[in-house]
Amino acid sequence: MKFDGEIMEILAAYDLTGSLRAAAQLTGCSHHTVSRHVAARDAGRPIAEQARRERVTDAFMPKLEEWVEKSEGKIRADKAHEKLTAMGYTGSERTTRRAMEQVRAAYRLGRVRVHRPWVTEPGMWLQYDFGDGPVIDGAKTVLFVAWVAWSRFRIVIALRDRTAASVFAALDRTFRIIGGAPTYVLTDNEKTVTVSHIAGVPVRNQQTVDFARHYAVTVLTCQPADPASKGGVESSVKLAKADIVPKDTNLRTAYDSFTELEAACDEFMAEVNNREHRATRRKPAAMLIEEQPRLHRVPGNPHTVAFGLARTVAANTPMVAFENAQYSVPAHLLGARVFVRSHGIGADEQVIIVHIGSEGPIEVARHGRARPGSPAIDDDHFPGHRAKVPGDYTIRARSAAEADFLAIGAGARSWLLEAAAVGTARMNQKMAGAVALAKISGTAPVDEALGTAATYGRFATGDLASILAASPRGKAHRADEKTSLAQGTAAWATIGQPGKPATADANLEESA
């Protein structure tokens, strides 16, 4: 192949001699080469352009164009090669791929999306998106990335998840960082923003509508699967992930806590917002100062959804459910509405509960992460609560007869518990009998007899009266130095005498 300088020498020699062979002898090449270059010049073709040769795919190009047109450029070269082979094509698959690439390039010509440069206005647009954050304590984090369109100011906030509460809290913090709220907020069609599409029209999430109304902003979403419509924040996400997420390229080590990740995000924002941007040739932090007068004022109190998920405390149990677990709140919040969110990750993770009262938002409880089935309980939230002991029943009279029996005293309560535990029969009749005895013999003796019966398990019919009769109340028999309570021996004298059987007189007493 001849270079441009050599071709120019060949043409100059031909112009000098007017002979193909003479020019060939002067330039040291074949006269056929001189003839080809002279003919190309006379035809108006550029010098050094190779003459087109017939290719094996030329006869099949119309068919390739037809297939590409029908498939809208999606047919693969290997499938096209199989079809051509069945039609008598003898070329290689490599040749087919080259031909397919040529046909695809011609098909795409005129169908390429043309992007018009976006001329932004101060205070108008803010875009946000998410990126995969680092793994901390085995849990994956999320990077919330926001981008102010005019000043190119970037905000990166570490989140535990992408729930609505976390996103709205991040947006609230973003507005306060940039010193105001923009007119429009642009993002993807996530469930936190768009619940569905009807005839191509996005249906907004009600929580998002309430949030936007509170901050006087308009939340818009881009077309599905169209990242080019928010390319500014897409680039910011790539930049944040490349710098914050530990990789071999940035030499970052793994984060030990969520606090370290938050510190890394703050360092990243300070760095990128205080260096010259390649598009504006100015620092985003300086441009944001100029843009702040065009931003709307942020309300003093954040929207309640920024505090977390709304939950209603039960009417009789001061507990709320959050992510399949239960957490206690102060008892005075029974039936009230609270907001629950989580903060941190791993062992330092906490569940924070906030109540909005007349004095504004107040944190009412803070618990460690609980597991399903094992609620997080603070004993101070249950004033006057008595721990339940198995078998320790609270005795309450449900009828007049029961009230009369329990009025006897503590012995009656003990008798009731012990008699019920052993399955005593006809307890109501026996309780009524105890009440009758109390009216005759007095309440105190009967109460003492009931306590004795409960102690020794005497629950049969007549046991209470027997115990009451044998009670030592009244005259007490005591032994002194002259008398003894032991049985006497006088009856032993009749032993062995005829006609007088031996008997024991229990009333005889042996003199001392």
Image: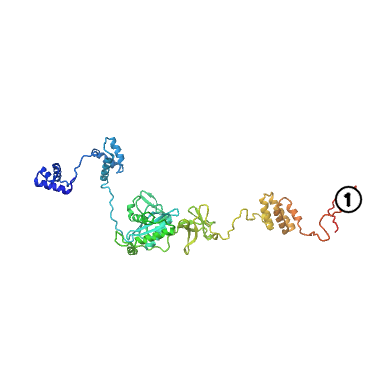
Give the crowd class for mark 1: few <14, some 14-19, many >=20 residues within 10 Å.
some
Indicate whether 4 appears above or below 159.
Answer: above
> What x and y, as percent, mark residue 49?
18, 45
How many marks are shown on the rendered structure?
Answer: 1
Residue lying at 73% horizontally and 52% vertically, measured from the top left: 463
Q: Nearer the viewer, residue 383 or 220?
A: 383
> What x and y, as percent, mark residue 4?
17, 48
Q: Is residue 128 visible?
A: no
Badge 1 amino acid: Thr
Q: In the figure, is residue 445 to the left or right of 202?
A: right
User: Helix, strand or loop at disc 1?
Assistant: helix
Q: In the figure, is residue 138 to the left or right of 273?
A: right
Determine which quarter of the picture holds residue 404: bottom right
* Figure quadrant of the N terminus: top left
The residue under label 1 is 494
Q: Nearer the viewer, residue 55 or 63?
A: 55
Determine which quarter of the picture holds residue 397: bottom right
The image's colouring method is rainbow
Q: Is residue 190 visible?
A: yes
